Amino acid sequence: MRARHRIAGAAVATALLAVLGLVLAAPASSAQLVEVTGFGTNPTNLRMHLYVPDGVGSRPPVLLAVHYCTGSGPALHSGTEFASLADRHKFIVVYPSATRSGACFDVSSPQALRRDGGSDPVGIMSMVRYVHQRHGGDPDRTFVTGVSSGAMMTNVLLGDYPDVFKAGAAYMGVPFGCFATTDGSSWNSQCANGQIVRTPQQWGDLVRAAYPGYAGPRPRMQIWHGTEDSTLRYPNFQEQIKQWTNVHGLGQTPSSTDTPQAGYTRTRYGGTGGTAPVEAISLQGAGHDLPRGGMAAETIRFFGLDSGGGPTSTPTITPTVSGPCQVGYTMNTWNTGFTTAVSITNRGASPVTAWSLAFTLPAGQTITGAWNTTITPSSGQVTATNAPYNGTIAPNATVTFGFQATHTGNTAKPSAFTLNGAACAVQ
């Protein structure tokens, strides 16, 4: 099971970090990610990190962002665009971190699949209530999004707490209850492989059973999935659509279908506007590698947190570069630690194979873990080499990796990078 979790986490981390070269420019901010302890009932000892942008209002919106297996809250903060969007649109982001082996969230136990039943959802709800109470978060503008395991948790939280979350967005998830087990296992291969198929009514009944007697409004739902996802397979996309359209009392026929950009098919149910009750985006040829650049902005648009307030197509940002290679290096620091997301773009005319990126860590920085790469040694002049699955960089293509490290007060970035001996431009 651990191997399966690592495979899923590595694939997701690759995609999450790939967006870093595409992050939209945001105003300079002094806000920092901070860890919060003692936030309330927490039966599974989850960790909580909080990002409060500069200049938030007196009743700011709240976004809960839930990570993938093998990930963490800080890794999701540094590896996605939600923090930069929070700076722009002035909402608070809560990042829970799973602590069990494999760092997956509990979306399978009977306790997790009922309101206030225990396990991870109870600890996560304590985080949300903490932000409402301590930071004046707006209960009428509280949302959740997640990636892989976090997308499964998004489905779970919308079922358990429909009165708390106004909308959710699931990147590469499965329906509420699909991962359910009774033997203590946290992995359901039948669901992961897309082999659990139910009627819309059956899926909807699972959601309704999580909070019996609830008759209030249900959260809107945005669903993202790639057709070539080999970790949580593509049939789960349609099963989620069946579930959430049924929860909203809708049929299976879309109100509208469009193509926001090449390879994207977007269907909306129960409305044709940008805030339909259910919105689903299928990505032709994509694997377990979402979100990509610009997708987070579409989620913020769906939540109604963007300044424009209307639907947009996914933007593509092309940075100005020079040289045979380009490196992006984005740090998220806290206390005595940090995570770093690194992107390598091949700007040459030929593929790069068996890549090796050399750089010097500033004094006092020591690497404690890495993903999508092997880095040696752990400090000083280090070399990051490719993993077995990302060793070739085609012309104009990008690979990504990341690492976690400690520091003794020096949070400077390396000043230069060489790829297979050639100097790279620094983004």
Image (cartoon, grey):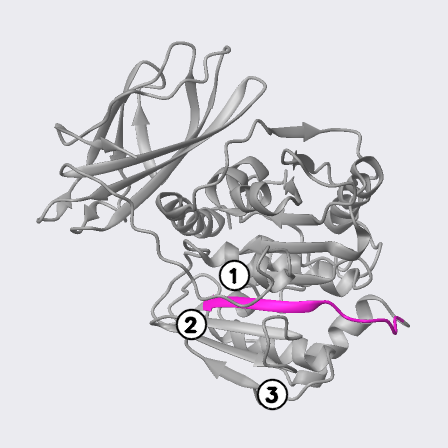
Calculate the distance from the C-alpha at mark 3 to the C-alpha at mark 2: 21 Å
The residue tagged 1 is: 298
Q: Residue furthest front?
A: 308
- Residue 400 in percent (x, y) is at 33, 42
- Residue 46 in percent (x, y) is at 70, 38
- Residue 297 in percent (x, y) is at 51, 56
Q: Was residue 375 drawn as part of the magenta stretch in this picture? A: no
**Dot 1 or dot 3, earlier in sequence:** 3
The residue tagged 2 is: 260
**Label 1: how many Cα within 10 Å (few below 14, some 14–19, many 20+):** many
Evaluate if marks 2 and 1 touch, with contact meaning CB atoms under 8 Å apart. Answer: yes
- Residue 344 in percent (x, y) is at 26, 40
Q: Nearer the viewer, residue 8 or 190?
A: 8
Calculate the distance from the C-alpha at mark 1 to the C-alpha at mark 3: 23 Å
Seen at 84% across and 54% down, the residue is 116
Relative to residue 88, is residue 199 depicted above or below? below
Secondary structure under tag 1 reads helix
Q: Which numbered circle lies on residue 252?
A: 3
**Dot 2 or dot 1, earlier in sequence:** 2
